[in-house]
Image (cartoon, rainbow, N blue to C red):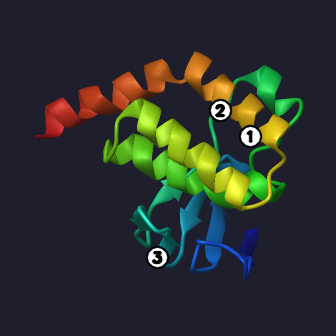
Amino acid sequence: MPHFSICNINSNIITELDVRCLSGGKYWLVLQPYVYLGDDLQITIPRGFVTDFASIPWFCRLLAQPASGKHRRAHPFHDYMYQTGMFTRKESDLYWKRIMLEEGTPEYKATLLYDGVRAGAGGVWRNYRKLDALTN
């Protein structure tokens, strides 16, 4: 099974991204806690969390493959914020863009991805909130 770890020493992401491929490459299992620690934001993704590295519209995938590039390390945080509902949808999207930029993603690419999820991820957000309502 594919497995990789990546880190950037000049980042607010303070742990390595350590994941293992599940389900033919669409889903990835986080193998150890993955932590972002900014001045005003802390997010800890627990071991066992499953990410798809970004469910972005097909037209955005043409320019930015979610599981590659400098923006890769930001995607699990976006998935986690969406799944947990720890912030509003807009806040989650803005934090994701911020992390991508901090990781060195070019402004045009981070903006394209941000605009893509703002345009196309509302249904995903609503589905997670429906699941919240059923399980609480």
- The secondary element bearing badge 1 is classed as helix
Q: Earlier in the sequence, mark 1 or mark 3?
A: 3
Please give left or right for residue 29 compared with residue 102 in the image: left
Q: Is residue 80 left or right of residue 115?
A: left
Q: Residue at x 80, y 59 (%)?
A: 104
Mark 3 touches mark 2? (CB < 8 Å): no
What is the CA distance from the residue labelled 2 to the residue labelled 1?
6 Å
Where is residue 73 shown, x and y percent of the image?
Answer: 67, 61
Residue 103 visible? The answer is yes
Going by the image, does 30 lie left or right of 25? Answer: left
Q: Amino acid at mark 1?
A: Ala
Secondary structure, mark 2, is: helix
* Picture quadrant where residue 123 is located: top left
**Quick one: 38 or 31, which is closer to the camera?**
38
> Residue at left 64%, top 49%?
53
Classify 75 as above or below 8: above
Q: Which residue is mark 1?
A: 110
Q: Amino acid at mark 2?
A: Tyr
Residue type at the position of mark 3: Pro
Q: Which residue is mark 3?
A: 33
Question: Considering only vertical position in the picture, is 124 above or below 103?
Answer: above
- Say if 31 sits above or below 121 in the image: below
Marks 2 and 1 in Cβ contact (< 8 Å): yes
Q: Residues within 10 Å of mark 2 (few under 14, many from 20)?
A: many
Q: Quadrant of the C terminus?
A: top left
Using the numbered discs, state the Cα–Cα distance from disc 1 to disc 3 in whole angstroms: 25 Å
* Mark in the foreground, 1 or 3: 1
The numbered mark at residue 30 is: none
- The numbered dot on residue 114 is 2
